[in-house]
């Protein structure tokens, strides 16, 4: 089906009209799909995957059912974990990688594409705002005027803290961390910690994942592991004498 000129402008990040029948119907469809997902109750991982694909308008085939419920759950280990409730405008502009974790109360204003890379984790109440409005109120005109948007891209292996707001046009580089409560107004380089309102660079992350580091992964016992605020040793999470992770209980 050929896209309308107005919808093409929306997807390109140009001025377009949101309160036309076509886009109002698409937001209503997405809202109903989100409601079904959010209110599904205690259902299987497969059923949640089906309902979430409905939000995204994703027609990809799910793996055939396994013999037992336990084996069937394992088939979805790499599917995104999206805690409920979640809210989106259109759904089809949201792209999530493998093994992504989105905590509850996430909001995606997906006027333009919003992508989240594999293994990225988001805390509760994270908001992705690809939509924006003209500054001039003469042009803005409430629901009768045009609006626009810019794409948001979050790289692989990132950690986005709770209550973070990510604004239109922001790219967050691979392996980066955004501190809780931050408002991200500018793009973030790879392997960087940012925090604040507006978010500012706090430090560089030293990791073997960074090609520029020259490091080679040697296992957990060789890695200097730190949390967001204080070293893990100070949080009682590791053995200070050996600097190794504690055994699982």
Image: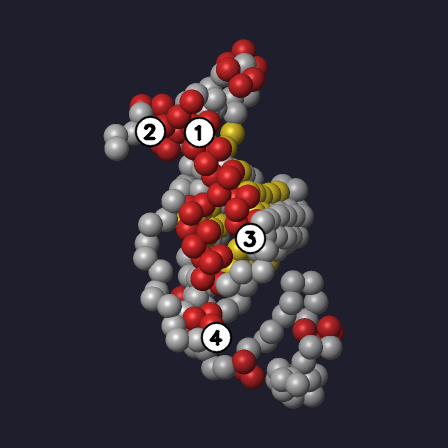
Q: What kind of element bears circle 1?
A: helix
Residue of label 3: 40
Residue 120 in the image, given as x and y percentages of width and height? 50, 59
Residue positioned most to the front? 67
Q: What kind of element bears circle 3?
A: loop
Distance, label 2 to label 3, CA atoms, is: 33 Å
Q: Earlier in the sequence, mark 2 or mark 3?
A: 2
Whether residue 157 is situated above or below residue 214 in the rendered picture: above
Residue 8's mark? Answer: 2
Quarter of image, res 62: bottom left
Whether residue 47 is situated above or below residue 105 in the rendered picture: below
Distance, label 2 to label 1, CA atoms, is: 16 Å
Front residue of this view, candidates 23 and 205: 23
* Eye-nearest disc, 3 or 1: 3
Residue of label 4: 70
Distance, label 3 to label 4, CA atoms, is: 20 Å
Circle 4 crowding by C-alpha within 10 Å: few under 14, some 14–19, many from 20: few
């Amino acid at each position: 089906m050929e896209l309308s000129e107005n919808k093409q402008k929306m997807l390109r990040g140009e001025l377009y009209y949101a309160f036309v029948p076509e886009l109002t119907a698409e937001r209503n469809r997405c809202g109903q799909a989100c409601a079904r997902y959010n209110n599904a109750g205690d259902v299987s991982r497969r059923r949640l995957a089906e309902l979430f694909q409905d939000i995204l308008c994703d027609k990809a085939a799910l793996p055939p059912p396994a013999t037992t419920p336990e084996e069937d759950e394992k088939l979805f280990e790499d599917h995104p974990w999206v805690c409920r409730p979640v809210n989106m405008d259109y759904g089809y502009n949201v792209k999530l990688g493998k093994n992504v974790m989105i905590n509850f109360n996430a909001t995606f204003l997906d006027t333009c594409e919003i992508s989240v890379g594999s293994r990225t984790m988001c805390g509760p109440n994270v908001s992705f705002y690809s939509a924006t409005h003209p500054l001039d109120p003469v042009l803005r005109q409430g629901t009768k005027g045009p609006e626009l948007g810019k794409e948001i891209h979050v790289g692989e292996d990132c950690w986005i803290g709770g209550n973070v707001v990510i604004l239109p046009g922001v790219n967050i580089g691979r392996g980066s961390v955004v501190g809780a409560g931050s408002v991200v107004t500018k793009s973030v380089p790879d392997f960087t910690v940012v925090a604040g309102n507006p978010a500012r660079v706090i430090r560089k992350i030293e990791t073997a994942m960074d090609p520029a580091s020259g490091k080679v992964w040697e296992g957990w016992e060789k890695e200097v592991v730190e949390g967001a605020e204080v070293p893990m040793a100070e949080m009682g999470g590791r053995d200070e004498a050996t600097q190794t992770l504690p055994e699982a209980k």
